[in-house]
Amino acid sequence: MKRVKLSRILIFAFLVLIACIMLVPFVWLVIASLRPNMELLSNPFGIPETLNLNNYFEVWRRQPMLRYLLNTFLAALIAVVIDVVISVMTGYAMLHRFRMRGKLSTMFYVGLFIPANAFMVPYYVMITKIGLYNTIWGVGLIYGVMNLPFSIMIIRGFMETLPMQIIESGKIDGATANQILIRLVLPMTKPGIVTVCIFIVINCWNELFFANLLTLSESSRTITVAIQSYLTSFEANYGFAFAAMIISILPTLIVYIFLTNKIIGGMTAGAVKG
C-alpha cells in the first residue's frame, strides 16, 4: 500500500510539474500584455514596473477586433461544415466493399503526410480564378481542404468500430442507404464528429500562412493576421501584439472551460468502442 501511495504521489507531483511548466509561457504572456512596449523592449523578462490595460484598450480602439474574431469563426465554421459533410459520406461509403476501396484508402493516408504549404501556388491560383480571393469563403474553403484528409480518417476510423449488426438489421427492415446513414450511423458517430470539429476549429483559429496569403483588406482579415500586423519590419509593438493574442485566446478558452466534458468524451470515445 505504501508503494502504491508513493507511486501515486510521484505521478501527481510529476503532472503538477508539467502543468506548471506549460503554464509559465501563458502567465508570462498575460503579464507582458499588461506592460508598456518600451518596458518590454528594454527588459522583457524582468519584474514589471507598470501593469495596466492600456494595450487592450488601444488594440480594441485601433482595429476592429470583433470583426476579426467573427471572420475567424466564420472561416472555421465553413471548414467544419465542408469537412463533416464530406467525411461522413466518405466514411459511410468506405464501410461497403467496392473495387477501388483499397486505392482510395491509400490516397487518404497519403494526404495526411503532404504539407499544405506545398500547394500554396495552386491554392492561390484556384481561389483567385473562382473569384474568392480576399473573402472569408475562400479562406474557409482552403481550411476545409487542408483538414479534409484528417477529418476523413478520424470519422472513417470511428465508423469502422460501430457494430455492423445494426446496419444489417436496418437493411433487413427495409431501410434505404440514406435512412441507415441518417437514423443509425450518424447518431452513433457523434463523438467522432465532435472530435473532428474540435481539431478543425483549433487548426483554423491558429492558422496564419493561408489567411495572410488569401486576404488583403480588413473586411476578410482573421485574428492571426491582425496579430501579425503589430510585428512588422518597420514597427514592432509587442505590447499590442500580446494583448491581441490574449483576446484571440479567450474565446477558445471559454469554450473549453464550459465544454470540457464533451471535448474529452469526444476525444476518447473512439478508443473505447467495439
Image (tube, rainbow, N blue to C red):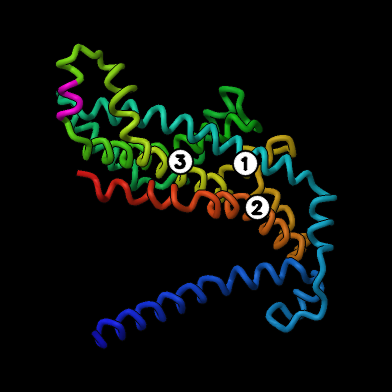
Contact, mark 2 vs mark 1 (Cβ under 8 Å): yes
Q: Secondary structure at mark 3?
A: helix
Q: Is residue 166 magenta?
A: yes
Would you name the residue on which mark 3 appears? 197
- The residue lying at 58 percent from left, 36 percent from top is 75
In this view, 55 is above or below 207: below
Q: Of 260 and 115, which appears nearest the observer?
A: 260
Q: Which quarter shows the N terminus?
A: bottom left
In this view, 94 is above or below 41: above
Would you name the residue on which mark 2 appears? 248
Would you name the residue on which mark 1 appears? 72
Crowding near pointer 2: few (<14 within 10 Å), some, many (20+)?
Answer: many
Q: Is residue 17 visible?
A: yes
Write down the region rendered in magenta: 165-169
Residue 80, given in percent of the width and then of the height, sits at: 48, 35
Q: Is residue 151 magenta?
A: no
- The residue lying at 56 percent from left, 29 percent from top is 127
Q: Of 169 and 145, which appears nearest the observer?
A: 169
Badge 2 amino acid: Ser
Residue 270, given in percent of the width and then of the height, sits at: 29, 46
How far apart are labels 1 and 3 at the CA level?
Answer: 15 Å
Residue 44, given in percent of the width and then of the height, sits at: 71, 77
253 left or right of 235 in image: left
Q: Of 101 and 134, which appears nearest the observer?
A: 101
Q: Quadrant of residue 189?
A: top left
